[in-house]
């Protein structure tokens, strides 16, 4: 058993390893410890006498969750559970994913990030701050595990909420919970990281509970130098790790993707993950609509990093269907708050580089409103990535529905209050003739005697399986071809019958099935592109299955 150890608070008492075991979230079982384990590990008297199964524990967790009054309370409860018993947390999440997803991720995680300082209970993940410059290697050495996957943010653009500084860590935490639930990563292989580069949010700088450094945010070269130092330290320590960038401001999201993707195993989920899942929905939406991909006309409202990524992948999907690059590019009309982005617009030469990337160069005259663009273009699909809230007006949607049967409408901004149109309004304004998916969940809507269910165009369909496929293949880089292979796999998992009924994406409750299929597709593509260091096996599905984390209590500590 080992000798007794001095109590950590210096009370003069002693505690045994069994007490410590109850405070080890990766090994704790609470009431599921059996009699022989209680004797062996010094647990007698430290837990209630009843011995329960994992299933009984899950049932109790769900009952406790359902009596709470708000999703934020449920979020806090689940966060505490994760820090106490990770196996129970992940089994509960696996068994009740559709119910819990809006709690552990969008929309609730947005509120949790806004109130991060007030809600803080215990440390999760790691922080690299301005005060730690020149110590990044030491910080990496302080982490007790060897991660396979890192999700990192600088808090610069959290969902559609803007600069939340050090409060942004909730996003990497939530993403990595989905890497475990949908991508089969073991919890100890996941590392959430917050880069504290300061904040320009005045409310946070004046908040006594703010947990970041109260400095103005780094910009330009100073920001890049900080992130360079971080990436170098991480890959010195863990050369085989995968790094996902999350919720950086557009300028830095695109800059660092271009800067690091050829050197490190990294990707940006806002740019590439969003693009992949939207492309999957676009493929299925056009199939359900009866429109050839190469002929589809698209209006994109929003011109940030996500929009740039989506536009690029839509072009690739159209090219794969037979369009030339120019044809595909000219079939997408990108708009911002001032209307259509065209080189004929006054001041066009002063547009930033990512707006210039897809500005129209064919002489299209300026159009100052979304309604005018839709009237002129008659699009088959309308995507919102603006973060501006309800900007898809009744006139715009009604005009679209007049010109196209079953228009594809995707208000993708998160959280729910930032969506460009509500599900209810979209149904009413199209008289129920539409194909719809949103970035955040919407409640069912009754209309015309029918119940309409909103699909959710959520990156979770792609990034967990993408990460697993990269980890298993040990790919030297993460290519657009690998990500698009994942997108096509997601699209393929929706049947023709489901498409006819207006369903665009697989059921959320099937997230792990989707993750396994995407992982296999990514591994195959990595092999075909010659970037896989581990050859793709003939029975790739079985290899993926064997690698998946399964939240259960193992018999070696029964």
Image (cartoon, rainbow, N blue to C red):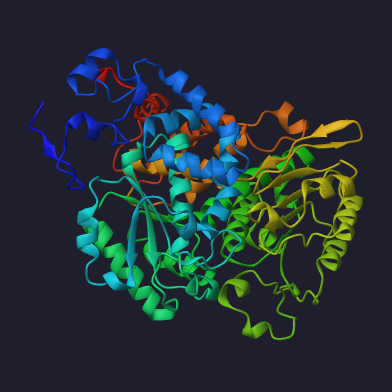
x, y percent for residue 235: 26, 57
Question: Which residue: 40% across, 16% down?
Answer: 52
- 203 over 42 or under it: above or below: below
Question: Which residue: 66% across, 60% down?
Answer: 385
Q: How many marks?
A: 0
Asked whether, in this view, residue 467 is left or right of residue 201, the answer is left
Asked whether, in this view, residue 489 is left or right of residue 398, the answer is left
- Quadrant where the image shows the C terminus: top left
x, y percent for residue 20: 23, 35
- Quadrant where the image shows the N terminus: top left
- Work out whether residue 33 or residue 330 is closer to the camera in this orientation and state it: 33
Question: Which residue: 32% across, 69% down?
Answer: 228
Locate residue 417: give its quadrant: bottom right
Asked whether, in this view, residue 375 is left or right of residue 346, the answer is right
> In the rendered image, is residue 473 in sight?
no
- 511 over 275 or under it: above or below: above
Question: Which residue: 90% across, 60% down?
Answer: 395
x, y percent for residue 526: 40, 43
> In the rendered image, is residue 280 in sight?
yes
Locate residue 454: give its quadrant: top right
- Work out whether residue 423 or residue 173 is closer to the camera in this orientation and state it: 173
Asked whether, in this view, residue 421 is left or right of residue 536, the answer is right
Locate residue 313: give its quadrant: bottom right
x, y percent for residue 296: 75, 52
Q: Residue furthest left?
A: 3
């Amino acid at each position: 058993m080992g000798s007794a150890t001095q109590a950590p608070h210096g009370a003069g008492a002693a505690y045994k390893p069994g007490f410590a075991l109850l405070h080890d979230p990766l090994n704790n079982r609470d009431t599921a410890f059996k009699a022989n384990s209680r004797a062996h590990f010094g647990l007698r008297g430290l837990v209630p006498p009843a011995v329960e199964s994992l299933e009984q524990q899950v049932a109790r967790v769900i009952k406790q969750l359902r009596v709470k009054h708000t999703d934020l309370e449920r979020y806090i409860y689940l966060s505490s559970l994760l820090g106490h018993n990770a196996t129970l947390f992940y089994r509960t999440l696996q068994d009740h994913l559709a119910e819990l997803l809006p709690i552990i991720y969008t929309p609730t995680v947005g509120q949790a990030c806004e109130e991060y300082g007030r809600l803080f209970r215990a440390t999760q993940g790691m922080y690299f701050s301005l005060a730690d410059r020149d110590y990044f290697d030491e910080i990496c050495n302080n982490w007790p595990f060897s991660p396979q996957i890192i999700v990192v943010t600088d808090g610069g653009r959290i969902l559609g909420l803007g600069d939340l500084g050090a409060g942004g860590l909730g996003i990497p935490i939530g993403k990595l919970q989905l890497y475990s639930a949908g991508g089969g990563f073991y919890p100890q292989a996941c590392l959430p990281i917050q880069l504290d580069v300061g904040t320009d949010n005045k409310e946070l700088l004046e908040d006594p509970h703010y947990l970041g450094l109260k400095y103005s945010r780094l910009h330009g070269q100073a920001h890049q130098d900080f992130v360079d130092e971080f990436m170098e330290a991480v890959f010195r320590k863990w050369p085989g790790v995968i790094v996902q960038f999350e919720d950086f401001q557009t300028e830095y999201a695109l800059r660092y993707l271009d800067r690091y993707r050829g050197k490190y195993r990294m990707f940006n989920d806002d740019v590439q993950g969003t693009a992949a899942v939207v492309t999957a929905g676009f493929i299925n939406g056009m199939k359900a609509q009866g429109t050839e991909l190469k002929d589809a006309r698209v209006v994109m409202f929003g011109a940030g990093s996500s929009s740039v990524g989506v536009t690029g992948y839509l072009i690739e999907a159209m090219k794969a269907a037979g369009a030339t690059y120019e044809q595909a590019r000219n079939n997408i009309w990108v708009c911002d708050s001032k209307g259509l982005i065209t080189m004929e617009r006054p001041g066009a030469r002063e547009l930033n580089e990512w707006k210039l990337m897809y500005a129209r160069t064919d002489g299209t005259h300026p159009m100052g409103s979304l309604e005018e663009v839709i009237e002129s273009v008659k699009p088959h699909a309308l995507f919102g990535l603006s973060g501006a809230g309800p900007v898809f007006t009744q006139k715009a949607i009604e005009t679209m529905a007049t010109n196209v049967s079953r228009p594809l409408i995707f208000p993708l901004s998160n959280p729910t209050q930032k969506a460009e149109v509500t599900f209810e309004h979209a149904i009413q304004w199209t008289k129920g003739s539409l194909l719809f998916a949103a970035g955040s969940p919407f409640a069912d809507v009754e209309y015309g005697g029918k119940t309409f269910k909103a699909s959710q165009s959520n990156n979770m369909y792609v990034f967990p399986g993408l990460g697993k496929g990269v980890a298993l293949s040990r790919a030297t880089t993460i290519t657009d071809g690998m990500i698009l292979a994942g997108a096509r796999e997601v699209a393929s998992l929706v049947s023709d019958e489901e498409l006819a009924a207006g369903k665009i994406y697989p059921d959320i409750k099937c997230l792990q099935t989707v993750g396994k299929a995407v992982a296999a597709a990514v591994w195959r593509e990595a092999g075909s592109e010659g970037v896989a260091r581990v050859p793709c096996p003939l029975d790739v599905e079985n290899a993926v299955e064997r690698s998946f984390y399964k939240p259960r209590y193992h018999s070696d500590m029964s």
